[in-house]
Each structure stands twice: as C-alpha cells, then as structure tokens.
Amino acid sequence: MKLSALTQKGYIFYIAVVATLMLCLFLRTYQLERYPAESHVDELSNFYDGYSILETGADRWGLKYPTILRGFGDHDNRPPMYAWLCALSIKVFGYSTFAGRMPSAILGFFSAVLIFLTTLRLGGRLFAFLALLLVTLSPWHIIYSRLGTEPTILPSFFIISSFYLWLKTRSKDYNSKYLLLLGFIIGLGTNTYQSSKLYFLFIAILIAADIFFYSSSAKLKKIGFLGLACFAGALPQIYTVFTLPEQFFARTHDGMIDISFSYHFLNTFLRNFFSNLSPEYLFFSFEDYNFLTMGRLLNTEFLFFYLGLFFFPLVHKKTTHFPPVYFYLFIAICLFPSALTTQNPNALRTSGIIVLLPIISATGILFVYRHINKVKWRNFFLLVTISLLLVNLAFFVKHYTQSYFLRSAIQQNHLVQLAKKLNNYKDKYARIYIEDKGHNQPYIYIARYCDMHPLAFQRAIKRNEPIVAGWDHLVQLDKYYFLSRPEIEQIAQEATSKNLYVLQTPNNQYKQLAEIITGKFNFYIYEK
C-alpha cells in the first residue's frame, strides 16, 4: 500500500486514525495503577481529597465544597479541579489508584483527539495523522496521562481545547456561540494549576487583541462576551481571591527569580526560557528524571522538531485564517511562567506545551516530505520515519516497564508497600510508631492504604510540628506517630504495653514481624 493513500483514500486514512487512537488509549490506560508505580505524594493528596469530597462534601481538612485545596502546608494551596474529577471517578470505579488516575488518562486521550482535529484544520490529513501519531507516542504525554496530579495533563488539555476552539471561532469571525464556549474553556483552565492562571490570562488577552484588530464587526461587544465567559469559567478562583486571599496568593513567590529591569534578570529569564527547548532536555535525557518525567520526546523527532520550529510559517503559510505567529505565541505563553522561576527546565511548569510539541515535529516531517519530488521516495521516507518512531517508543516502553527505578522514581512506592503492610497489623496495636526523617508526608500513605475514612481523618488527633515554615510535618495522626529514631527508641524503652514500631534500619533487640526491602529505602516492623 502506498502511504500517499493516507490522504487520497478516505477509508484508509480513517482506518489509520482509528488504529492510532486505539493505540493512544491503550498506552494511557493499560495497567494504569502499575505504571508508574504507586504513588506520588501529590497523587495521594488528590485521591484522598476527591474521596473526602465524595464522602463528606469537604476536603480532608474539613473545608466544605473547596474552591482551593490545602495540600501539605500553608504554602501548598492548589486549584481543586483534579480532586473534584477524582470524586467523580471514584464514584464510578471505586476508591483506588486506577480511579484516581483515570481522569488524567481520559483527558490525555481526548487531548490527542483535539490535536488531530486542530491539525486537520491547520494542515490537512497527512499533517493531522502525523501529529496524532506523535502525541500518541510521546513519552511525556503518555506518563503525564497516567499520573493523577493537577499539573500533569489538565493544563495541556485546556491549552489544546482553547487552541482548537480559537481556530474554529476565528474562522467564523467570532460567532457569539463559539466565542462564549471559548471564553468559558479559557476561564475553566485557571482552575487547573498555579502556572495555568498565567497561561490563560495571556491567552484571553491575545484573543481579545485579535478580536479588536481583526474582527470585522461589533468588536467591543465580542470582547465583552469573551470577558464574561472567561469570568464565568474562572469564577471558583475569583471567589477564592476574595474569600481566601492568603491561600490564593500563598505560592505566588514560590521559587521565583528576582524580577528587575536589569541585564541579569533578562539573561536568567532567557536562559530559563530556552532551556525548556534544548535538545539535551527534550530528546537526549531518557532515564534523567525531571518533575515526574523520565523522558520528554523521542530521539527520532530531534531533527524534525527543529525544522518544524523554524519552518512552521513556511509550511503553514496557506492557513490564512490562523497566522502562524499565534502558534509561536502559544508556545511562549506555555514557557513564560516557568522562565520566571528557578529549577529549569521544568516539565511540570511547562506542561501545557506537551500538546504543542507534536504539532511542531509533524510540521518538520511534512516539510521534508514536501521537498522530496518523487512519490516513491516520499512513501519510503514516511515508512522509515513512522517505523523509527514506533521502534523508538517500543524501546522506551520496554525499558520503562522493566525497570523498577524508572517506574518508581520519586513515586515513594516504599511508603505504599509499608502502609499496605501496616494495614494487616493496625487493629492489633493501640499505637504505631514510624521512623520519619521529616519528608515525604508519610501520613497521607497511612490514610490512603490503611483504610482511614475521611470522616475519621477529619476527627482524628493531628499534631503538626513544621520543620520548614509553611510546610506540614505531622508527628501524629490518630494512633500513628511519625518520629525520629531516638524518640522512638526512648518510647520503646519506657512503654508498658506492646506497640508496633517501624524503623529504617534493623534493631536486634526487638521482635521483628516483617520487613520491606526496596534497595534504596528499607523498613523493619517490630513489636515490643
């Protein structure tokens, strides 16, 4: 079969699209609870808050119908959309890691569908198929579609939704019906993550400017419609600004670089900005952890990505209803918040861009394809390119799934194993003492895997002794105590009844009941 039939024969094109979508769904849902390994601390925060909202109408701290969530301290407040989606998913699938991650998997799949629809409007069938294939095979997009945290897939879903709706709305000279939907989606996007507030503010300003300069009629009326719709979508966050201002602005300066009118600031900002587009970070750092990712794009995309980035206007110059400069502005908007902070490149703070990168790489492939004159060589080029992409993804999947290190990186799976083990002992002891070195928030693992109902959590004695200002360090949750090794050994010496003790190194003086050996982190469970 000639690959040019993808664009010439409708049924072959749609068979290829459906097959790619099926692969996309499979890669985002297969053994969802196992890859990545259970479970990142921020995932559990969302899962447990979603469970709590479903069961009690409040988050785990007792805030009714929350419009902002307190995570792990006064400095850790976050938009609540993902927790609310978890509540719905848990209602359908039951309380589990699978249910908690399912909203991301679904949104990841539908973001791929929206990429296809967007690129179909931008550049035709072959371009749309290539973009769909690339996002389907994107390691960054796959992993973020399988994690239950608010900054992974939510911002990018609303970025591509806004982009697609803007294309559609602009082509109809900002028809009121589409404009209201576009504005509402942009407003909703502010409820996803901290940096998304800036994403969607800039997108709203960009669209308002486009209406003012290029719409043919009723410009101010259309801008007003856009503003009202954005306001409606962002209403939960606007409500929070006035009712809980301290919580809303708590993370405003978190990790920010010093902003000034100086060369030093400009140099730092530009270095941060372009580090998120560097070849080493995007293509050649597989197995190098970066904010919940173990690889961003496929090595095979390298040349095509930079060709697409440079020649995007040339390839899409006939797309008169959507100037290519707007696409570059979307990229800049997604990188801007991260560039203002430390720790770059940053996969989380730039997560909105993961739906735009496949469009760039697809543009590069299309650029090369169009510069090959003979049809047979064009077909050969596509066949080789698609084959290399599939082989590249197969390599990533094989190594990721076979490596405990890769699939459990920063996932605190050792705490999951510990909490599951303690669940077998918890009813036999009045007190359980767990050695804690002051990080990883072990209490949330106990609440999740030792079957603590949200009402029980809300009513439980909770003793908080922060080590770092603004961040929780719970030393007691009901009968569970999280203490240092010397404190635990002192209690064990003075105890008059049997308790359960969890230590991170062996103690031969106690009766050992179980052990958990993961290599880097080990636990020994004792009775004394």
Image (tube, rainbow, N blue to C red):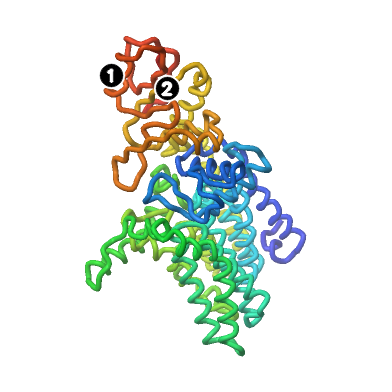
Q: What is the x, y in percent for residue 307?
A: 46, 66
Of 21 and 511, which appears nearest the observer? 511
Q: Is residue 257 left or right of residue 502?
A: left
Q: Is residue 207 above or below residue 67?
A: below
- Among all residues in the image, which is located at the extreme right? 11
Across the whole image, how many numbered discs are drawn on residues? Answer: 2
Res. 493 image quadrant: top left
Q: Is residue 191 above or below residue 431?
A: below
Q: Residue at x 48, y 37 (%)?
A: 407
- Residue 432, label in figure: 2
Residue sitting at 53 percent across and 68 percent down? Answer: 367
Quadrant where the N terminus lies? bottom right
Residue 125 shown left or right of residue 391 in the figure? right
Tag 1: Cα neighbours inside 10 Å, few (<14), some, or many (≥20)? few
Q: Of helix, strand and loop, which one carries label 2?
A: strand
Residue corresponding to mark 1: 490
